[in-house]
Image (cartoon, rainbow, N blue to C red):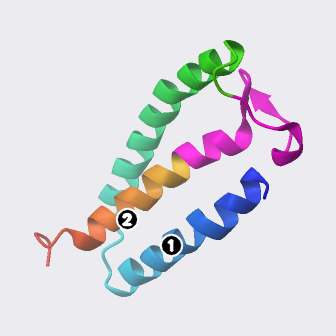
């Protein structure tokens, strides 16, 4: 399975489901978007260089046939997508489970 397919099968569907539920409940706010966006930026800025370092050192690798090819600092673009999608998934789930705003 390619990294892109993994994201499509296991990460994107729960994000879409959570977003739909929160949209129906009218709980997707600008504040949620800003929080997820800021946290995504932190995740990318912190994790990207670290992943690039461990890839250069040979600790971590991605099989060429499993990723699209383009990289940013040795890190496949799918990995950056994963950083952002995981923050989105966690943020939406937290919003759904947070009962203080109900």
Out of 92 and 63, give the one closest to the viewer: 63
Residue with the most extreme front position: 59
| Magenta stretch contains residue 73 | yes
Seen at 71% across and 20% down, the residue is: 73
Instruction: Judge whether 67 appears above or below 94 on screen.
Output: above
Q: Which residues are magenta?
A: 61-83
Which label sits in the foreground, 2 or 1? 1
| Magenta stretch contains residue 51 | no
Instruction: Measure the C-alpha gap from mark 2 to mark 1.
Output: 10 Å
Q: Which disc, if any, is residue 14?
A: 1
The residue indicated by pointer 2 is 92
Helix, strand or loop under label 2: helix
Q: Which disc, if any, is residue 65?
A: none
Seen at 68% across and 60% down, the residue is: 6
Q: Within the image, what quadrant is residue 13 found in? A: bottom right
- Quarter of the image with the N terminus in it: bottom right
Seen at 46% across and 81% down, the residue is: 20
Q: Position of residue 68 (x, y in %)?
A: 85, 45
Q: Position of residue 33 (x, y in %)?
A: 40, 56
Helix, strand or loop under label 1: helix
């Amino acid at each position: 399975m390619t990294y892109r397919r993994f994201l499509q099968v296991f990460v994107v569907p729960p994000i879409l489901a959570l977003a739909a539920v929160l949209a129906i409940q009218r709980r997707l706010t600008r504040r949620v978007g800003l929080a997820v966006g800021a946290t995504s930026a932190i995740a990318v800025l912190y994790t990207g260089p670290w992943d690039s370092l461990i890839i250069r050192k040979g600790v971590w690798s991605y099989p060429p046939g499993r990723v699209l090819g383009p990289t940013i600092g040795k890190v496949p673009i799918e990995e950056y997508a994963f950083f952002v999608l995981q923050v989105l998934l966690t943020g939406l789930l937290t919003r759904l489970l947070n009962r203080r705003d109900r």
